[in-house]
Amino acid sequence: MPVTAFDRDIDRVTDKIERCLLQHEAYLKSIGMVVNSTKTELIQFSRTSAPRVTLRNGITYKKTIKAIGLTFNDTLVWTDHIKKTAQKTLKTTRSLSFLRRWVDRDSALQILTSQFFGQAYYAASVWLNNMLIFENWKTLERQHYTGLSDLPL
């Protein structure tokens, strides 16, 4: 469950987060569930080098987290997500090149459309925007055209 707190004072943000987490824990306990603090992650999004929140309950700060198939970093630059996506799509392209021996052109195109493009542009409405840094645009472009050119159709 995400907890959101906005404030310029780091101590007030910390207090808000800790109070909210206690409320979540109490609710989960009331319905028979337990919070595993070793699996709970804290990420603080900021475009500047803001002071980091430190919680008293042992939850540690992470620079990147993975949620619903997206890799978020604390500055929302998306470099980590795009690198991981490029690695996945490279594996998919290699697999498709291997499979191409046994499937016809139309089947290969269907696999390419569903697998490669599904992986490459998953949740693009979240991360694919005009705020991407130039290196990330180049990685995406390389990934897209390499994926298409490597597949013998």
Image: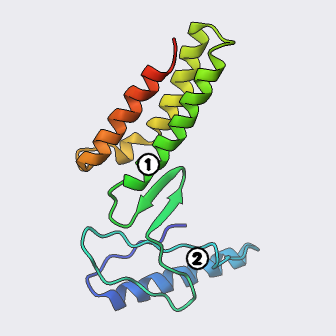
Counting every numbered tag in the picture gives 2
Q: Toward which corner of the image does residue 22 lie, by quadrant?
A: bottom right
Quarter containing the N terminus? bottom right
Residue that mark 1 sits on: 83
Q: Residue at x 65, y 20 (%)?
A: 99
In front of the other: 5 or 49: 49
- Determine the residue located farthest toward the right in the rendered image: 32
Q: Earlier in the sequence, mark 1 or mark 2?
A: 2
Where is residue 89 drawn, in percent x and y?
Answer: 51, 36
Query: 70 left or right of 138?
Result: right
Q: Amino acid at mark 1?
A: Lys
Query: Does 54 sit left or right of 29 as displayed?
Result: left
Residue type at tag 2: His
In the rendered image, the vertical position of residue 44 relative to residue 99, given as above or below: below
Left or right: where does residue 94 sit relative to residue 52?
right
Name above or below for residue 110 compared with residue 71.
above
* Residue at x-position 57% and y-position 29%: 94
In the rendering, at what x and y percent does residue 37 appear?
63, 79
Q: Secondary structure at mark 2?
A: helix
The residue carrying pointer 2 sits among few (fewer than 14), some (14 to 19) or many (20 or more) residues within 10 Å by Cα, namely: some
Mark 2 — residue? Answer: 24
Residue depth check, mark 1 versus mark 2: number of the one nearer the observer: 1
Q: Which residue is at a point 62% across and 15% down the rendered structure image?
A: 100
The answer to which quarter of the image holds residue 38 is: bottom right
Q: Residue at x 43, y 70 (%)?
A: 63
Nearest the viewer among 34 and 139 is 139
Label 1, secondary structure: give it. Answer: helix
Q: Position of residue 51 (x, y in %)?
A: 31, 84
Residue 8's quadrant in the figure?
bottom left
